[in-house]
Image (cartoon, rainbow, N blue to C red):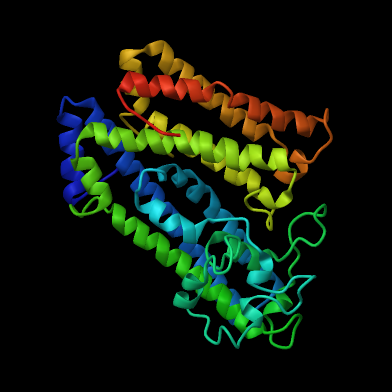
Amino acid sequence: MRLYTGLALVTLVSACSAPNPEAAAVHEYAVNLDANYKDVIARLSDLQTAVNAFVQAPSAAGLVAAQQAWLAARPPYGECEVSRFYGGPLDQAQGGMNEWPIDESFIDYTTTNPNGGIINDPTDYPQLTAQVLAVSDERGGIENLSTGFHAIEFLLWGQRVDQTAGPGQRPYTDFVDGGTAANQDRRRTYLKTATDLLLSDMQGLDGLWDLTNPASYGAMMVAGAPKDGLTKMLRGFSNMAISELFYERLSDPYVTQDRKDEESCFSESTFTDLNANALGVEDVYLGRYQMMTGPSLSDLVKAKNPALDMQMRQELSAIRAALAAIPPPFDHAVLSPVGSDAHDKVQAAIDAFSPVQATIDQVAQVLGITINI
């Protein structure tokens, strides 16, 4: 059973007792998203703990533990990305948290630039503080990314020298004084600082959604006009499904055949990202998060057009099933020969998205909402 205090509890009671189903759906969305954000924070706290232990005493086992903690943080973050695209807290934080692709040589050494990157440039970057890393993001180019999930991913896995052999194979001795590469102490500092910054950014984002604070973005969304809240929900839902998940994350790598266009290329975990995004999209429509469930967009559509609601549900379910069927790692499936099972499954996932745009447009019309994808 869920228990809430302050504004969240008052709002829950009023939303559930009020005759306005739109307000109830907005409230459920806000409560579910609040829980999702807090799960991300919990997993990032685990990552911080693992990274702290590793940099204090680098070891092969410690590096694996940090990698596993990073991987564990990705599903809840991928689910909450559906809260972008309407000017909310995640839109403000996303640039420094989950942008890609990264020019690896902006951060650290690569095979073609053994002395490259911020880590190996103590002259221009004498201090590797959170402020220094944050202001360096995109300095000199949009792929010059210095912070966020994928900067940490690169530090943990390293460059994929052999693109066909799996994830990067960075040795833990890159972090050991006198070990491999150079500037091992700065590499430790960078990893710890970037991890601390990512957690801090997520905590700040969660604070902006705090349902116990009447002045927060989340509380004001719940207290505002229900139609405005529904518009934000549907814009996030539609843009995440079509613009981001379908075009940028699934179709673009398929069309370009470029491994750098896949999201988590260093760890080879893009399959997890795609499936988490699809789950987040479906959850918003169904008004659920994990075991939490309540009034939803689906309920509102069903009340006006049951057939359309069923169609939307079936299409979202088909997307999830098609993405789950792609054999990981994702880039290997994308680059597999035409006619192969892996290639056909990527194509099937792309095909599963074909009717969704038109259905979302119909859902918006039924709800009296204007969206821009």
Quadrant (top left, top right, bottom left, bottom right) of the N terminus: top left
Confirm whether residue 57 shows in the render: no
- The structure residue drawn at horizontal position 40% and vertical position 52%, both measured from the top left corner, is 90
Looking at the image, residue 105 sits to the left or right of residue 138; the answer is right
Q: How many marks?
A: 0
Q: Nearer the viewer, residue 172 or 120?
A: 120
- The structure residue drawn at horizontal position 76% and vertical position 39%, both measured from the top left corner, is 333
- Residue 304, above or below 337: above
Looking at the image, residue 272 sits to the left or right of residue 233; the answer is right
Q: Residue 239: percent from the left, percent from the top?
A: 46, 37
Quadrant (top left, top right, bottom left, bottom right) of the C terminus: top left
- Residue 279, above or below 171: above
- Residue 247, above or below 170: above
Q: Nearer the viewer, residue 95 or 219?
A: 95
- The structure residue drawn at horizontal position 35% and vertical position 42%, both measured from the top left corner, is 32
- The structure residue drawn at horizontal position 20% and vertical position 50%, both measured from the top left corner, is 5
Looking at the image, residue 168 sits to the left or right of residue 195; the answer is right
**Residue sticking out furthest to the front:** 140
Q: Residue 198: percent from the left, percent from the top?
A: 47, 65
- Residue 200, above or below 328: below
Q: Residue 167: percent from the left, percent from the top?
A: 74, 57
Q: Quadrant of residue 58?
A: bottom right
